[in-house]
Amino acid sequence: MNAMRSAKDSRVAVVTGAGSGIGRAVAVELLGAGWSVALAGRRPQMLEETATLAPKTPDGSAGASIAVPTDVARPQEVAALFAATVERFGRVDLLFNNAGTFGPGGVPVEELAYDAWRHVVDTNLNGAFLCAQAAYRQMKEQHPQGGRIINNGSISAHTPRPRSVAYTATKHALTGLTKSLSLDGRPYNIAVGQIDIGNAATDMTERMGTGALQANGEVVPEPVMEVADVARTVRHMAELPLEANVQFATVLATAMPYVGRG
């Protein structure tokens, strides 16, 4: 494969957590726009289902995909993910660092098991670092040099929900990771940004419709937005020229309790 392809022809993305929710929606959006996409996640069947959802265009302009079962908390599996992507597509232009877990919901701080805390940290923070590091190494060495990393931060990167200490701590940490990667990527044409998402309609937020615990102790239903709206925002960020970067974007259901939360 010619490493000196035009920027238009070299759009290759790695999407983690691609088997469901936001990751699946973003992967499908990118595939429909002609990106080649490596679908990463722990459940092979779900990744294959995502691949089947890609639009079928008469002119064949939809992108190709590969499914690479990956636990982002395992360094060897992350290395294998990026090796498989480069072997198939020749380079990496985008990492959507999306894989994450909320952990056990509604557990008070004093009752949260260390193993549960560690699982959330390993997935949300350590996994994001490992994937960013692998992407960074590839983007630095490839020709043309550079690429883009978009981290999925969450509204909880700004403001916590009650009883969400592990999730909130990792998402706040992800903001620091985004800033540091963005600074260190400048000499190598690596742009890094973060999208903070609130109440997109996925399996993870299904409970919002029946009621979510609020800071005052009440359980109140919350509005949600279509996950496709998030996917279009990620695509916009991804398709900017590397000379431009959306450093932070917040996309949320308009009436959700975020501004003024608590």
Image (cartoon, rainbow, N blue to C red):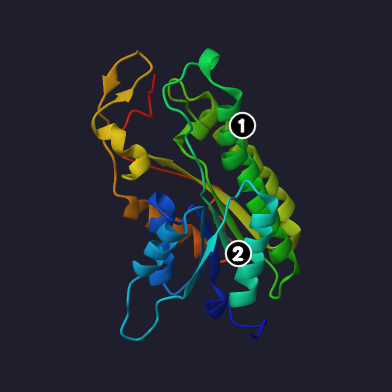
Q: Secondary structure at mark 1?
A: helix
Q: Which mark is residue 180?
A: none
- Graded by Cα atoms within 10 Å as few (under 14), some (14 to 19) or many (20 or more), the crowding at tag 2 reads some
| Residue named by callout 1 | 118
- Graded by Cα atoms within 10 Å as few (under 14), some (14 to 19) or many (20 or more), the crowding at tag 1 reads some
Q: Is residue 186 above or below residue 205?
A: below
Tag 1: amino acid = Arg
Q: Position of residue 216 (x, y in %)?
A: 35, 13
| Residue named by callout 2 | 242
Q: Secondary structure at mark 2?
A: loop
- Residue pictured at 57% horizontal, 55% vertical: 70
Side of 65 relative to 4 (left or right): left
Q: Quadrant of the N terminus?
A: bottom right
Tag 2: amino acid = Leu
- Residue pictured at 71% horizontal, 49% vertical: 183
Q: Is residue 13 above or below residue 170?
A: below
Q: Is residue 260 at all visible to an observer of this figure?
A: yes
Q: Is residue 91 at all visible to an observer of this figure?
A: no
